[in-house]
Image: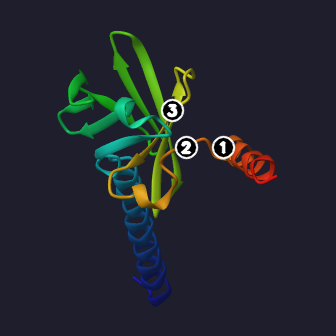
């Protein structure tokens, strides 16, 4: 074996090894990204009255709504959670930020529901209402003070 042949063989070996290592890193990173452990926990409905607030719990044993088991399994693809129940499929999408994780219900789309992960309630206005509530408050202040 000549010197150039040995160098070429070493280069090919190193290239193949690095390619396999990079591919494995990508694969395991993706598997971690789509692992349901990232959505495990209690999710509290935003904008509902206190007596009617829904709590969604996701864990390895299933999906619970207000501490009642509704499904023994859910699918998570890294962005969306699909829960199959006797009433059909419910689809939730991750929303918010890393510091304020939220779920938005896509299906069924009525009534609209948003959830925030327990422990992050202080990062948003839990009473909901959004811009409509702000407009009503502004109108009330404007006409109430005259």
Q: Position of residue 114 (x, y in %)?
A: 50, 38
The mark that comes first in sequence, 3 or 2, is 3
Residue at left 35%, top 32%? 51
- Residue beneath label 3, please? 113
Q: Quadrant of residue 52?
A: top left
Q: Residue furthest front?
A: 146
User: How far is mark 1 from mark 3, CA to CA?
Assistant: 17 Å
* Mark 3 or 2: the one toward you: 2
User: How far is mark 1 from mark 2, CA to CA?
Assistant: 8 Å
Mark identifier at residue 141:
none
Residue at left 33%, top 51%? 118
Q: Quadrant of residue 3?
A: bottom left
Residue at left 69%, top 48%? 137
Q: Position of residue 104 (x, y in %)?
A: 52, 38
Left or right of residue 143, residue 5 in this image: left
Residue at left 41%, top 80%? 10
Q: Position of residue 112 (x, y in %)?
A: 56, 29
Q: Residue furthest left?
A: 61
**Res 71 seen here:** no
- Residue beneath label 1, please? 133
- Residue beneath label 2, please? 128
The mark that comes first in sequence, 1 or 2, is 2
Say whether marks 1 and 2 touch (CB < 8 Å).
yes
| Residue 136 position (above or below residue 120) | above
* Mark 1 or 2: the one toward you: 1
10 Å crowding of disc 2: few (<14), some (14-19), many (20+):
some
């Amino acid at each position: 074996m000549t010197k150039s042949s040995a160098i070429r063989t070493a280069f090919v070996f190193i290239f193949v090894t690095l390619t396999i290592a990079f591919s494995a890193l990508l694969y395991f990173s993706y598997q971690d990204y789509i692992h349901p452990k990232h959505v495990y926990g209690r999710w509290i409905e935003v904008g509902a009255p206190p007596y009617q607030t829904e709590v969604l719990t996701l864990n390895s044993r299933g999906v619970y709504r207000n501490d009642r088991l509704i499904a023994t399994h859910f699918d998570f693809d890294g962005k969306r959670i699909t829960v199959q129940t006797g009433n059909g499929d419910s689809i939730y999408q991750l929303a918010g930020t890393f510091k304020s994780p939220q779920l938005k219900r896509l299906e069924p789309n009525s009534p609209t529901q948003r959830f925030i992960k327990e422990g992050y309630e202080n990062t948003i206005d839990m009473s909901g209402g959004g811009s409509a509530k702000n407009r009503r408050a502004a109108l009330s202040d404007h006409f109430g003070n005259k």
